[in-house]
Amino acid sequence: MSEPSLSEGPVELFRHEKFWADHQPWLAERGYMLRPRYRPDWSPSWIGKSGFPSDYEDSALPINGHILDATRKSNGEIVILKHVNQNVFPFEKDISLFFSAEPYASHPRNHCVPIYEVLNVPDMENHCILVMPLLRPHDHPRMKSIGEVMEFFRQIFEGLQFMHQLHIAHRDCMTLNIMMDPRPTFPHGYHPRRMRRTIDYKGRAKYYTRTARPTKYYYIDFGLSRRYNPKDGPPREHPILGGDKSVPEFQFAPGEPVRPVDPFPTDVYYLGNMIREEYLKKKVGLQFMEELVRDMVQNDPFKRPTMDEVVKRFDEILRRIPWWKLRSRLADKNEDGEQRFIRKVHHYYRTTCHILAFRRALPTP
């Protein structure tokens, strides 16, 4: 059978959605309700109606084949279900649960996504589903001030330092694997697959800035992560490509032997490169981060600072930034004159409100 056509709307489930439809009754028994699209009696709601398929909630596709949203029947919370093949990713479940158990679960420096529950798939050996909170991309909606982005940097540095101090390397801490808790900024929620819309799909989701409602950032996706025993000495791993393919120590000429490397300096590179590519190259006013980031992305991994050193240097940078700089607007380098004028006016109004409400320039939750 051929794949359904998107031009007329996905009138049949795609191949990568079949797992969820097949297991919908079991998930409902375990307390998780999938959207109508994945229920046995589903038929496209837009057939014979006006408008575009995208106007209808049940046209929304999953993020990818192994991740889907669901509603927890006990309290109505929207959660994320992640299907993990433990034959391919044998350490993901254990490392995820390691950070979700005490004494680490409640530790303030823990920025690893919490796991609510693990469901073992009944008809698939060594397959499980991780149940976790609904998170949002760390930069959506966009950050408004220097203080907001510096708090983001502070938290992700702190979180990776915490992992490294526990001898765990993430090994894929690129931009897509850093998320934010949307509950403070989106108190009324939003649709998990159409993030600009309300949960009922009928309007535009309203949100607060991070300064008004400080939030927490999380690392996700521990499929490539590893935990090491410090008694075994510095770890060495053969290169494995994650989302960021630019790691200098992973670049080999044809015929050159592949050398195992220490994964901890590679983590430092991933984080530094994310800041360089997503912020220093795209935003105005972050020059004070350039020297630290330049050191984090050095070609020689032995010359990169450790995460302990990164956190120490970042704290020194942060202490030197005056309050008015933290309040200033985080501007895009590519914005045009009209955008710049409108955003400046909005920022002036917002900042005045924040100051009058005694909100901190560095929005720490």
Image: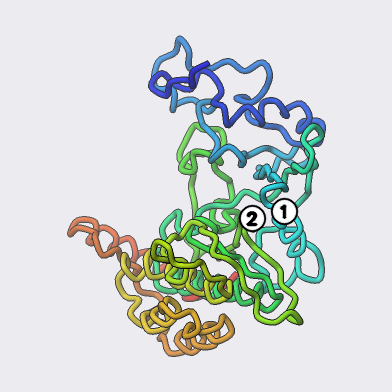
Direction left: furthest residue: 337
The x, y position of residue 324, in whole percent, is 38, 81
Residue to which mark 1 is pinned? 90
- Taking 363 as reference, is 224 above or below it? above
Mark 2, secondary structure of its residue: loop
Mark 1 and mark 2 in contact (Cβ < 8 Å)? no
Asked whether the viewer can see residue 168, the reply is yes
Q: Nearer the viewer, residue 200 or 292?
A: 292
Instruction: Report the Cα–Cα distance between label 2 and label 1.
Output: 8 Å
Quadrant of the rendering where the C terminus is positioned: bottom right
Q: Which mark is residue 223?
A: 2
Direction top: furthest residue: 48
The x, y position of residue 243, in whole percent, is 48, 56
Asked whether the viewer can see residue 359, the reply is no
Direction front: furthest residue: 255
Name which residue lies at 41% across and 64% down.
Answer: 246
What is the count of numbered marks? 2
| Circle 1: residue type | Pro
- Taking 45 as reference, is 70 above or below it? below
Please indicate whether residue 119 sits to the left or right of residue 6 in the image.
right
For marks 2 and 1, the one nearer the N-term is 1
| Circle 2: residue type | Gly
